[in-house]
Image (spheres, grey):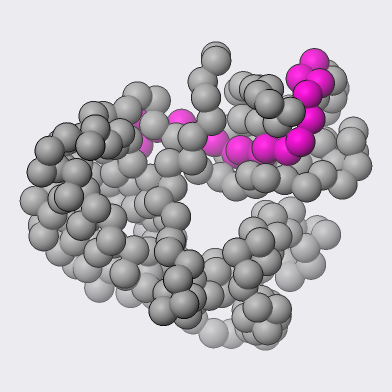
Amino acid sequence: MGRAFQNRKESMAKTADAKTKVYSKYGREIYVCAKAGGIDPEGNLALRGLIERAKKDQVPSHVIDKALDKAKGGGGEDYSLARYEGFGPGSCMVIVECLTDNPNRTFGDVRACFNKAKSKLGTPGSVSHMFDHCAILAFEGSDEEAVLEALMEADVDVTDIESETDRITVFAPHTEYAKTKQALAEAFGELDFEADEIQFLPQTTTPVVGDDVAMLDKLLATLNDLDDVQNIYHSAERQD
């Protein structure tokens, strides 16, 4: 497919005053993932990847352990996934993923962010059909054929494989995440993944110019300030 890998998730600031928010978002996601699939990272590959990402983002061990202990107890908050779609400045497409214990509150908060940025919240499915929901695994290597062969032998439904500057990136349907990661581990041993996550990647990008650039930044900043927001994906390509 020849598509260059681009991480469309707007990364959260890691400044000192934002660390508490970052820790809270990871803690909530680890709790939900562990509660759904088990607290053992060896048996829950999604949890394992999430913990590895948290450690790379310098989330303290006690934050991770607290979330796992909470999931082990079986009680606690009842979070659910909420996904909102809409059109941002310049008609770019936006997907917002949340974990919430109060969907009505979260919907109102997200809608307010869109309104303040002169954007429009859409209905479910209004933009997601223009994104690929992908598992993305990137690691050091150059033998693209060996990777493809290993994944085909494991009957993994590979979407795309890219090799660029001693880095291999594997794209697969999001439902194939655990199977893909397991096949790579069995074929090549423990890998240090530079990217290990599930994302929405836009099939096309939308140029955003002029005043719309500032409005896009405002939309993303206000959304990231919401405790319930976990990930933001968009099709915008800034033309400063």
Q: Position of residue 145 (x, y in %)?
A: 80, 16
Magenta residue check for 124: no
The x and y percentages for residue 131 are 40, 32
Q: Is residue 42 left or right of residue 23?
A: right
- Rendered residue at 45%/71% (across/down): 15
Residue 76 located left or right of residue 111: right
Task: Identify the residue at horizontal 81%, vertical 21% (top origin).
Answer: 143
Question: Does residue 237 lie above or below 15 as drawn?
Answer: above
Above-or-below relation of 204 to 105: above
Q: Residue 136, how many percent across, how many down? A: 61, 38
Front one among 132 and 82: 132
Residue 134's x, y, as percent? 54, 36
Count every numbered label the image shows and give the total.
0
Indicate yes or no whether the magenta region holds residue 143. yes
Tell me which residue sits at (21%, 48%) in the image: 216
- 69 lies above or below 193: below
Residue 23 seen in the figure: yes
Quarter of the image with the C terminus is top left
* Vertical side of 215 occupied by 1: above or below: above
* Residue 195 or residue 184, whichever sits in front: 195
On the rendered structure, is 36 left or right of 178?
left
Asked where in the image residue 155 lies, by quadrant, the reply is: top right
Give the image quarter of residue 91. Answer: top left
| The residue stretch that appears in magenta | 125-145
